Image (tube, helix red, strand yellow):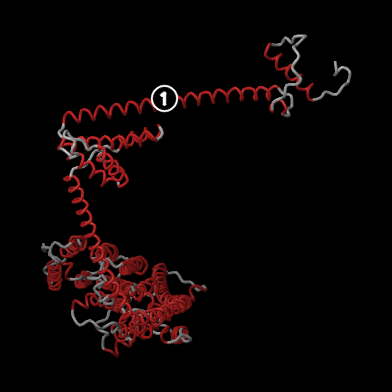
Amino acid sequence: MCLENGVIPDAAMIHAARKRRQKAREQGEFIPVEEPKEDKTKKRTVQEDGDGDGSDEDDDRIDMSAITGAKEREERREQFYAVQREDSDAEDSDVETKEWENQQIRKGVTGAQLVSAQQESVISQYLIGGSFSQTFQNKSTLLLDDQRVGDDGTGEFRALSTAALLEKAYAASSGIRLAGTGAGSKRTTNASSNAGSKSSDTKPTGPRMPQQILAQLTERHRTTAELNRKHDEDIEHITQEVKLLQMDYRACEQRAPVAAAKYRFYQEFRCYVSDLVECLNEKVPLVAALEQRALALMGKHSGMLIERRRQDMRDQVKEVTDANKMVKRAGPEDQERVRRAAEREGRRTRRRRDREKNETAESHFDGMSSDDEIPDMDAARYRSALQAIELEARDIFADAAEEYGEVGGILERFEQWREHDLPAYSDAYVSLCLPKILGPLIRLEHVCWNPLTMDALVELENEKWYRTAAQYGCSATTEAALAADPDVRLIPTLVEKIFLPKLTALVEQYWDPLSTTQTFWLVRLLKRFVRDYPSLRSGCRPLRVLFQAILDKLKQSIDNDVFIPIFPKQAQEARSSFFQRQFCSGLKLLRNITSWQGILADAALKDLAIGSLLNRYLLNGMRVCSPVDAVGKASTIVYTLPRVWLNPGASVVQGMDQFVTMLRHLQSQLDPALPPNGELAEQIRKILTSLHVAAT
């Protein structure tokens, strides 16, 4: 009604509305029309006076919390009373149990036994805890004052009164323990009982006997003695370590100057090596460029001579063919061929005159000499180009100090390290690095080195770098020390890393297999290398590469330089000069190939000499020769072959079946009645005998 009249509700009205809503919730959705009036004088609680937003959730939460708090307080009160009742029951039961135990003890033991047991108990309690012993002593004194009883009333102590006294003392001690236990809370009693059950295995609850005390004291004494012994050992060990450390300290103090000097030396040497590597990195490309220039110049010179010889052979073949066909030409090519023929004949004439002067003309066969003569102007130009390269090579290290640009200076610095600290020198693998360090300098000195010519007759042993390297580190006095020397293979390694690749390049670009002089110098040099340097064996990779280059060059020469024209026998006399020269050129190549016996593999040489050259070219030329000429050529061929190849059962003899067949066929054509044929037959028989073949 107030709300309908527009009156603003106050706190009492709001509270009444809340109560009304709460009662409606409790009774359901029905709200009675009339509700009993509440006492307005009743004071509102804190919850009723509290501010709220009028929501149902807040009222429910307040009511439920009040109910729950009351229930919890009631439960805690009941639990507290129950615990108190249990404590009182437990105390009563403990007192009754102790009293029953005391009665049984008085019935079962005598006074003396009780006194002895009580004394042991007192001693044990004193050892275990001083507070309990003091309490027990006070109680015992009081009991002794009250127990002065006797039958005659004289006040003297008897044995029974003493036992009774000890019983009361025991009962008093038990009472004290019970009183102390009862004075605590129930929680303390339960904890003590639980702890006693847990510690029953480790610590006895009753009085301990003297034997147990003695055993424990003995064990503790043993443990203490053992610990003391360990401590003494540790002290002794630490003392020894201190002495050793003091000795090490004094030794380090003594070695400190040496270590400082060694440190300074290695720092200086490190700087030197860094500068040396930087210098070599700058100079090595220049050295390689000069080597390529020199090799290209030599290869061009040798290629010109080889191409001129092959061109002369083609010109002669053309001349013979044109003469057979009666063809005459006067074109530019013919004029050039005529010019080349004139130059060729002029060179032959000059060589013939030289042989006549040397009185070797009778033993010479046309085609055996090497046509390597060049005009004086070309020779001078070639020599001047080589000299210019040598001058440039001298200027490459002109701006470097001696210890960076000379073999002796570098080896001197490394020898200082070797003498200063040889183990560190060996651990640093300096012996493996020296050939690479010295390589550019030695290559620069031999940039125009060509052992295939007469101008390079200077032996390596006579050169300055060789003597310096040979004297490097010569401190070994015994054979064992020499074997342990890390630089004992310095010179063989230099030869392997520097000169074998150089020879390989010369073989590929300069060597002419038809030149007997070049082949002789190359074979001689390699034989000496293999003999003097044991490291140059079949497992040496640079040596295998060199041998393969030699075999490839021999195959190229057989394919391109050997040409033996085949003419009918009736026309052979007119063309004997060209035929004989070409056949002798083939014989010279056969001799140059067999000169490699003992250096190259015999199987490869036999395939080249017998399979490719003899059976393919020389035998075809011998078949069109006269018997006298054929027997002479056969004798020369057998004489050219190495003696080792002509042993009985050798593979060379088995591969010369075509040669043996040709000789037997030639022997069958000879008429024994003619005197000259008898000599020829005898020569054929000797040839077959040398080949271990029976003559027919």
* Crowd class of label 1 (few under 14; some 14 to 19; many from 20; radius 10 Å): few
Query: Dividing the image into 4 quarters, which one contains the C terminus?
Result: bottom left
User: Is residue 23 shown above or below 338?
Assistant: above
Q: How many labels, in total?
A: 1
Front one among 293 and 286: 286
> Disc 1 designates what residue?
85
Image spot of residue 421 (x, y percent): 31, 78
Q: Residue at x 34, y 26 (%)?
A: 92
Q: Which structural element holds mark 1?
A: helix
To which quarter of the image does residue 626 belong? bottom left
Name the amino acid, label 1. Arg
User: Is residue 685 shown above or below 108?
Assistant: below
Image spot of residue 539 (x, y percent): 27, 66
Q: Residue furthest right?
A: 5
Image spot of residue 609 (x, y percent): 26, 66
Front one among 250 and 411: 250
Residue 628 visible in the shown view: yes
User: Is residue 382 shown above or below 316?
Assistant: below
Query: Dividing the image into 4 quarters, which one contains the N terminus?
Result: top right
Residue 574 visible in the shown view: no
Front one among 475 and 335: 475
Image spot of residue 240 (x, y percent): 25, 69
Q: Residue at x 50, y 74 (%)?
A: 330
